[in-house]
Amino acid sequence: MRRHLLLLFMLLVSGHCFAQLKQYNITSYGAVPNSTTVCTKALQSAIDDCNAHGGGDVVVPTGVFIIGTTHLKSNVNLYLQKGAVLRGSPNLDDYTPYTPDTPYQHIHLGMFLTQDAENVSITGDGQLDGNGDAYFELDKAKKLDTSVTKYSRQGANFRHVESGIGDGPIVPKDRPYQMFIFSNCKRVTIKDVFITKSPFWCMHMADCESVLISNIRLWTNMLAPNADGIDLTSCTNVIVTGCDIRTGDDSFAITGFDHHFEVPGFEHLHHQSENILISNCNLQSSSCALRIGFLDQNDVRNVQVTNCNITNSSRGIGIFLRDKGSLENLSFTNITIDTKLRTGDWWGNAEPIHISAVRGKPGVKLGEIRHVTFNNIICKGENGMLLWGTDESILHDIYFNHIRFELTDSKLNDVAGGNIDMRGTLYVKEGLFKSDIPGLLAQNVDGLIINDFQLKWTDPRMPWLTNGVEINHFKNVRITNFEGTGAPNNPKAYPVEVKYGEHFTTDVKAVSVHQVDVK
């Protein structure tokens, strides 16, 4: 009898569990595959029905379905079967108009806007296609503004293209904004799907808590401007793992925005952006593969990046402070980086690692960058590393350990090399300007440790290449176990040069260190 009661109980429990896994196939709501029929209403009806009945799977079966703006809701899993494609409409009118804050003009939302939802996910072996090619002039490249390039080494010839569109970026038309917005959501999961051809930022998490992004393939057009991969803005407790991300703009952007120009999805919330783990990802970007910070109103802290490969990128790891939000406790471990110069109006000039704190907005007290660690990093790049603090925002406690860096020549040095690119600054002359290029340049830093750093120069030919490591306006700097030289083509270059600072220690031979006004 007891055995029969136990069996009956198990059947009741299992029946209850299966009852929760209801499926809502979008074709049952009128979606038509492989046609020009816009299926937005059918998809939304399936989502609404699923949510109203306690949740389950909204199933997209095999076939191509055209949609405009839809809204996911709590307890809904959008499940794309193998061979299923949700494709963004090529008609801008199929996307919901959105009016941003003054003074910006109205725009259109993208494919998904999900607000204030919990336990929401997108999974499966299918594809989400933003149809971005419909929103670009694919045969035209954006022109660089000569007012921006006038301080560069090449002036109006900066990143000149001999013919064609070079490395882009291509010219955008009026376009839908983010493919996905999850705004103020909890327990968000994105797994396994293939995402492609975003016309703007692709996946945007704003003010979300407890996010898992796992094993996705996210490929935008490498010539498409603003086509970020994953934007995490003011989010907490995020895990991203096992992803392959190839993007025209930043592969990752981890920021503390509570608003950002005309971009939708923000609710002007003030809180930390923190506890973000990124691991086991392959990244490529025509801009910055991994960007942290920019015009942040909120602080960003506790970010760990491990076991990632960055290849074919204009910039590897970029950490940017331009507003009042501070950036702290950032850790990068077991990463390979390969960067190169590009033509066209891309931010980034082949720095494997870039850290800068420069004013980007008037009328605010700038935050600080502090406690940043790089451990076991292997780099190959066509420009030097940069650590650039300013008098009003000094860099604090930066640690390099076990670094291998090969600085190589570039076929584009004549039209792009010998410059520092910090664009996104308040003043144009501080954004892009000519400079000599050491292997690593640091200024306005308090607390810099460099240990076990090997620097190699490959085919150096440009006269503006200089010292191996150059540090100026500093406090508390230590360099140990450094192996490297100044640029071999420059007889005046030193392995190490330090200027205008105090508390400098090193085990590098004195003959290899040039000191100027160091206490």
Image (cartoon, rainbow, N blue to C red):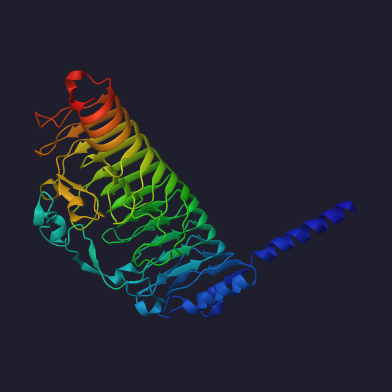
- Residue 233 visible from this viewpoint: yes
Q: Of 6 and 495, which appears nearest the observer?
A: 495
Q: Quadrant of the C terminus?
A: top left
Q: Quadrant of the N terminus?
A: bottom right
Q: Position of residue 485 (x, y in %)?
A: 18, 27
Q: Position of residue 356 (x, y in %)?
A: 28, 45
* Image point (43%, 44%), residue name: 280
385 is higher (above) or lower (below) than 102: above
Q: Position of residue 249 (x, y in %)?
A: 30, 57
482 is higher (above) or lower (below) than 233: above
Looking at the image, residue 210 sits to the left or right of residue 328; the answer is right
* Image point (53%, 65%), residue name: 116
Looking at the image, residue 20 sits to the left or right of residue 38; the answer is right
Q: Residue furthest right?
A: 1
- In the picture, residue 68 is in which quadrant? bottom left
- Residue 32 visible from this viewpoint: no
* Image point (47%, 73%), residue name: 70
